[in-house]
């Protein structure tokens, strides 16, 4: 019998993608909160980019991971 689910990814992939997008949004928001001139403080140069990088790592795993029922 044919599978009616024609999506490229499973539920787990989409949840990880949304989590990664949330990390990206929070990271960019953290960078805007920096009170130093031109964003050269701790939040603009260290904390925000680390959170954004974590978001990109989550996005990478969201694309690469397979659902158990797909395997």
Image (cartoon, helix red, strand yellow):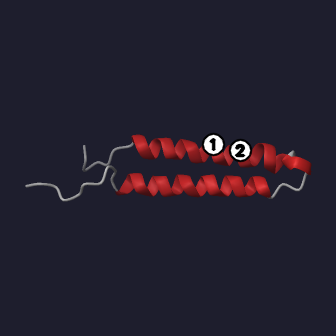
Counting labels gives 2
Left or right: where does residue 49 sit relative to residue 71?
right
Q: Residue furthest left?
A: 1
Residue 46, percent from left and from top: 77, 43
Q: Locate the N terminus by quadrant.
A: bottom left
The residue that mark 2 highlights is 49
| Badge 2: residue crowd in 10 Å (few <14, some 14–19, many ≥20) | some
Residue 10, percent from left and from top: 33, 53
Examine the image and state in which quarter residue 50 appears: top right
SS class, disc 2:
helix
Left or right: where does residue 58 sit relative to residue 24?
left
Examine the image and state in which quarter residue 5 appears: bottom left
Above or below, 32 against 66 in this view is: below
Q: Locate the C terminus by quadrant.
A: top left
Kindly report the distance in space between the C-alpha atoms of the residues bearing marks 2 and 1: 6 Å
Q: Which mark is residue 65?
A: none
Determine the residue positioned at 62% across, 52% down.
24
- 19 and 40: which is toward the camera: 40
The residue that mark 1 highlights is 53
Determine the residue positioned at 80% across, 58% down.
33
């Amino acid at each position: 019998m044919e599978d009616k689910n024609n999506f490229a990814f499973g539920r787990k992939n989409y949840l990880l993608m949304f989590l990664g997008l949330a990390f990206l949004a929070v990271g960019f928001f953290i960078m805007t909160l920096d009170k130093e001139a031109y964003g050269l403080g701790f939040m603009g140069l260290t904390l925000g980019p680390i959170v954004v990088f974590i978001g990109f790592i989550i996005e990478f795993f969201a694309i690469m991971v397979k659902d158990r029922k797909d395997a």
